[in-house]
């Protein structure tokens, strides 16, 4: 009798685990489909996003150029000063004006900062092809985000970084992300998705952390435009 009970319990646990895994995959599959579909996303080689950053009553133009999986360049103009951050493979460099604690000359990006930025080389997030990337995804449960039901997914990347994504239970779009921002916990809220050549891009991103709050408004997105790879190379001083 004890053996039968143990067998039943083992089978029940197996079924439970299998169902759980299928539920995670179903959510992820619907999320990828809502973004435009796996084939469409795989076909993106370059992405240029021009945004306006609103922070402390300032409007700052921001441009991000991505060669998917290879390199990333983000540049902003702050009160006439240029700020640049570049990740090229596993290394990075940046230019910070004096008002941001820099010298205005190119300098190496700290290793921890590079580690945090590398994820942006994949603009469609850690859920896209998560198994191939070696990421682990756990369904924490269903929660309210701005009064709407959302699936709370906990993600652990191959290199050990963790983050929490909240996927709208109706649209299956990402509505909130909780992650580490330069050593501090922060949140990003995503809204007002627009269709750009069959791919859904969040038109508004509201970021909050202990450092304060800021909002990004998307002005223009260019998919698979020509990119000059020299912009990712660190210039001589």
Image (cartoon, helix red, strand yellow):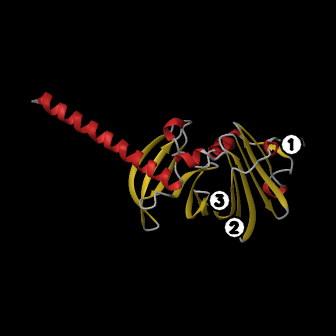
Name the residue located 52 percent from the left edge and 41 percent from the top edge.
129
| Badge number at residue 54 | 2
Q: Is residue 61 left or right of residue 131?
A: right
Q: CA distance from mark 2 to mark 1?
A: 29 Å
- Mark 3 or mark 2: name the one nearer the start of the chain: 2
157 vs 172: above or below:
above
Residue depth check, mark 3 versus mark 2: number of the one nearer the observer: 2
Relative depth, front residue between 36 and 211 = 36
Residue 21 horizontal/vertical position (percent):
37, 42
Residue 79 visible in the current orientation? yes
Choose between 221 and 207: the one closer to the eye: 221
Residue pushed farthest right? 237
Q: Secondary structure at mark 2?
A: strand
Dot 2 or dot 1: first in sequence order is 2
Which mark identifies residue 39?
none
| Distance in Å between CA atoms under marks 3 and 2 | 14 Å
Q: Position of residue 190 (x, y in %)?
A: 56, 61
Where is residue 158, by image quadrant? top right
The N terminus, quarter of image? top left
Q: Can residue 206 be seen in the rendering of this structure?
A: no
Q: Which residue is mark 1?
A: 235
Q: Nearer the viewer, residue 234 or 64?
A: 64
**Mark 3 Cα-neighbour bin, 10 Å: few <14, some 14–19, many ≥20:** few
Q: Which mark is residue 211?
A: 3
Q: Nearer the viewer, residue 93 or 204?
A: 204
Seen in the picture, residue 219 relative to 9 is either above or below; the reply is: below
Q: CA distance from mark 1 to mark 3?
A: 30 Å
Q: Position of residue 47 (x, y in %)?
A: 68, 51
Q: Residue at x 45, y 48 (%)?
A: 29
Q: Secondary structure at mark 3?
A: loop
């Amino acid at each position: 009798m004890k053996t039968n009970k143990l067998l039943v319990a083992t089978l029940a646990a197996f079924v439970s685990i299998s169902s759980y895994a299928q539920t995670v995959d179903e959510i992820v599959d619907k999320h990828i489909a809502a973004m435009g579909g796996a084939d469409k996303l795989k076909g993106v080689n370059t992405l240029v996003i021009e945004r306006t950053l609103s922070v402390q009553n300032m409007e700052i133009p921001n441009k991000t150029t991505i060669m998917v999986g290879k390199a990333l360049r983000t540049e902003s103009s702050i009160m006439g000063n240029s700020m640049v951050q570049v990740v090229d493979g596993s290394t990075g460099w940046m230019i910070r004006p004096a008002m941001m604690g820099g010298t205005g000359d190119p300098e190496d990006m700290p290793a921890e900062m590079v580690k945090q930025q590398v994820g942006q080389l994949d603009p469609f997030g850690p859920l896209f092809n998560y198994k191939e990337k070696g990421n682990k995804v756990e369904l924490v449960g269903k929660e309210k985000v701005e009064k709407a039901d959302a699936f709370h997914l906990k993600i652990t990347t191959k290199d050990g970084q963790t983050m929490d994504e909240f996927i709208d239970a109706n649209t299956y779009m990402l509505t909130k992300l909780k992650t580490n921002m330069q050593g501090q916990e922060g949140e990003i809220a995503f809204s007002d998705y627009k269709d750009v050549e069959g791919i859904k891009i969040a038109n508004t991103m509201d970021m909050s952390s202990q450092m304060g709050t800021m909002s990004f408004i998307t002005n223009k997105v260019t998919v698979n435009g020509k990119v000059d790879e020299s912009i990712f190379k660190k210039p001589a001083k």
